[in-house]
Amino acid sequence: MVVLRKPEKPHYNIPKAYRPIALLNTMWKVLMAIVANHITFLAEKHQLLPANHFGGRPGRMTTDTLHLLTHKIKGS
């Protein structure tokens, strides 16, 4: 935890003039984002997800899903 001074306070000898910032929560989020990106990279590299799975994959958009759906409807 880091304690920062609030800007433009007249006196810094009272506790309300400071703001505690918890860095552990922020570091955890950064670490989880790095791990998630690595898992996504490995899943794409080794083709672990089916071709029709579009959610949360890099380079895949909603329009890709709509094109696949339209192709399936018109094809059958």
Image (cartoon, helix red, strand yellow):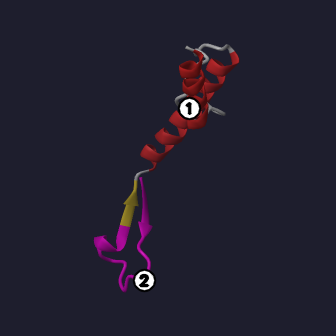
Examine the structure image and report whether residue 4 is included in the region drawn in magenta: yes
Return the residue nearer the eye: 55 or 65: 65
What numbered label is drawn on residue 66?
A: 1
* Within-10-Å neighbours for mark 2: few <14, some 14–19, many 20+: few
The tag earlier along the polypeptide, 1 or 2, is 2
Q: Estimate the x, y position of residue 69 in percent, counting from the top left.
A: 54, 25
Q: Amino acid at mark 2?
A: Glu
> Which residue is drawn at the image coordinates 37% and 86% (left, top)?
10
- Outermost residue toward the right? 45
* Within-10-Å neighbours for mark 1: few <14, some 14–19, many 20+: few
> Which residue is drawn at the image coordinates 60% and 23% (left, top)?
71
Q: Is residue 55 above or below residue 15?
A: above
Q: Is residue 61 above or below residue 44?
A: below
> Which residue is drawn at the image coordinates 38% and 82% (left, top)?
9
Q: Amino acid at mark 1?
A: Leu
Q: Is residue 26 above or below residue 20?
A: above
Task: Classify mark 2: helix, strand or loop.
Answer: loop
Q: Estimate the x, y position of residue 3 in percent, counting from the top left.
A: 41, 62
Q: How many marks?
A: 2
Q: What residue sits right under mark 2 in the picture?
A: 8
Which segment is the magenta one? Answer: 1-18
Q: Estimate the x, y position of residue 18 in percent, counting from the top left.
A: 37, 69
Could you tell whether 4 is left or right of 14 in the image? right
Q: Is residue 14 above or below residue 69?
A: below
